[in-house]
Amino acid sequence: MSSTLLQVIAGGLLLGAVYALFSSGLTLIWGMMNVVNFAHGDFVMLGMYVAFVTWKLMGGGPAASVPIAALALATLGVVCYFALIRHIMRGPMLAQILGTFGLALLLRYSAFWYFGANYQTLPDTLVGGTLPLGPIRIEASRLLAGVVALIVTAGLHLLLTRSALGSRMLAVSEDAAAAELMGIRPERMQAAAWALAAGATGIAGALIATFFYISPTVGETLAIVAFVTVSLGGFGSVPGALIAGLLIGVIESISAYMIGAVYKDIVVYALFVAVLWLRPQGLMGKMS
Amino acid sequence: MRPTRDWPAMMRKLGPIVAAVAVLAYPLVFATPFQQRLGALVLLYAISASAWNIVGGYAGQASIGHVVFFGCGAYAALAAYQHLGLPPIAGLPIGVALSVLIAAVVGVPTLRLSGHYFSMATIAVAELVRLAVANTQWLGGAQGLSGPPVPRTVFDLSFVSALPYYYLFLAVLAGVIALTWHIERSRIGYYLRAIRDSERAARSLGAAAPRYKLYAFILSAALTAVAGALYAAMFGFVDPDSGLGILVSVKMVIMAALGGAGLLFGPLVGAAILVPVEEYSNSLLGGAGAGLTFVAYGAIIMLIARFRPGGLLDGVLRALRRRRAARPTEKT
């Protein structure tokens, strides 16, 4: 295998780890509450702008922006849950989808109005340099983003499967009424899920901002990436999202390399339609 | 003998006639070019929102990528002019056929699954087609396609005044509403509403839910393509943003949802409210208003979903029904 192709695959895996991180948030909420957050990509977009503002105001890099974005987005997630999601969950399906879609528009065009339509980028000296790794060289910013995203995704998985909080959340997703009888408050657990999911998008956004363009409408593309990842990985499954995220990162990088950068999104979207035709339950999932 | 005149009954009889006269007379009474154009735009958006309403409102399947069908109609119309020299409207059958094909490709797999998959797939397909068209020179690429610069025959549907468009769109809208009305009263209409309210219950009673949802989706797609072709004829121009951008879908969804999704006249009411607001805010604020308009649209969609999932017209109809129920002596 040529070293260029290796380089492309490595880049795809690192980007895919970030995809996996924010898609985990989508899959967590979907699996637990049967709600699809159509504003999920725009949450990532806000995480990117948090990184941008952090740099603009205090010159901070990812060490500052990642925790700030995690906190800011987790707070936003909880607010959205109590102000909107909690109410529309009980409503008709149409209202559920339109509710989060309206939220997506509100966030996207507020950013558009406030920050302008121009693409922004963080200076590439913020996380500078490239590291030699065998025959290939990897940009430090992408390596940092990929590795941190992997660690956070793994941490999220452990939190959901190994901790008391995770067990309580699982109980609520299995049967909210029964969980309530056991002394678990469903609303608190669901709010916690929104905090975790939105916090994950904040971290992902702040990480990806170090090497990705920042624009108000970037969330639209990222939302579709998250949909593909979750459909492919099976909804509700963080390990599934991880594998699917890495796979999509690699597919995207290879298609950008082989047939051109403008076609990489087309390939990913077509993959989504193919998944829905052939394997809507995901690579590993069961039919719901 | 009645002691007083029965005003509500008279209103119910005369109301539709008054409304029809008002709609027919609007562009003659409000005869400035701006007002006539406004009226034509309200009707055009009402056509596409009414088309969306069939699958979104009646069947309860939120298609967020409906613009792809609008784009099929608009692009087919202008491609027919650009490549074959035909009047734009001659491309309509191609646009409708493409829309039906895309609706089937998207609908067959996703309408078997929960509604989320359907909504996600429609967004993905709309974006896929937008990117593909933006990179296809034959379809004008990022620059888009134009219609005939000067009308050659009346079939070009290219008029300086908005008045002919007004009556053309009115006739098409009347056709769409009549078709919807017919569906509403037919067996398939009852199936669709049963599926929307509880798919599981509808299936258990024997309604083949995926098949009826697919019928609704295909019909809705075909009618949306008609709206797209009419748009192309009036504006004489389409590019990936105006013909395939997600914001065009947003307008269809918000107009239907604001007026009342699943109600016959809901989309028209929504269009009659939102189109003037947008046109006035654009002419007042200029380009700076564009972003804010969509902030407001997002907020409105969210508030409808949260507080009034039935839309405005639903609230009015309920209030009327309550008043009627409160009149014990009245018999109709």
Image (spheres, helix red, strand yellow):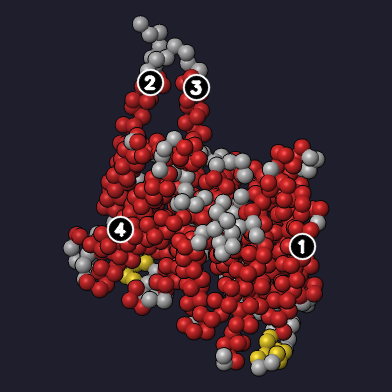
Chain of the residue under the numbered disc 4 shown in the image: B
Same subunit, tags 2 and 3: yes
- The residue type indicated by label 4 comes to Val
Which sits in the foreground, A10 or B158? Answer: A10
Is A121 situated above or below B305? Answer: below
What whole-number distance in Å separates the C-alpha atoms at marks 2 and 4? 42 Å
Is B197 situated above or below A276? Answer: above
Residue A47 image position (x, y, % from top left): 69, 66
> Which residue, given by chain and number where applicable, does mark 1 sit on?
A158
Question: Is residue B284 visible from the viewing direction of this image?
Answer: no
Which sits in the foreground, A207 or B206? Answer: B206
Res B96 label: 4
Chain of the residue under the numbered disc 2 shown in the image: B
What is the secondary structure assignment of the residue under circle 1? helix
Label 2 Cα crowd, 10 Å radius (few <14 / some 14-19 / many 20+): some
Same subunit, tags 2 and 4: yes
- The residue type indicated by label 2 comes to Ala
What whole-number distance in Å separates the C-alpha atoms at marks 2 and 3? 12 Å
What whole-number distance in Å separates the C-alpha atoms at marks 1 and 4? 51 Å
What whole-number distance in Å separates the C-alpha atoms at marks 3 and 4? 44 Å
Q: Is residue B262 left or right of residue A131?
A: left
Residue B95 image position (x, y, % from top left): 30, 61
Residue depicted at 73% across the width and 47% down the height:
A171
Quarter of the image with the N terminus of chain B in it: top left
> Which residue, given by chain and number where applicable, does mark 2 sit on?
B9
Is B117 situated above or below A20? Answer: above
Instruction: State yes or no: discs 3 and 4 in contact (Cβ < 8 Å).
Output: no
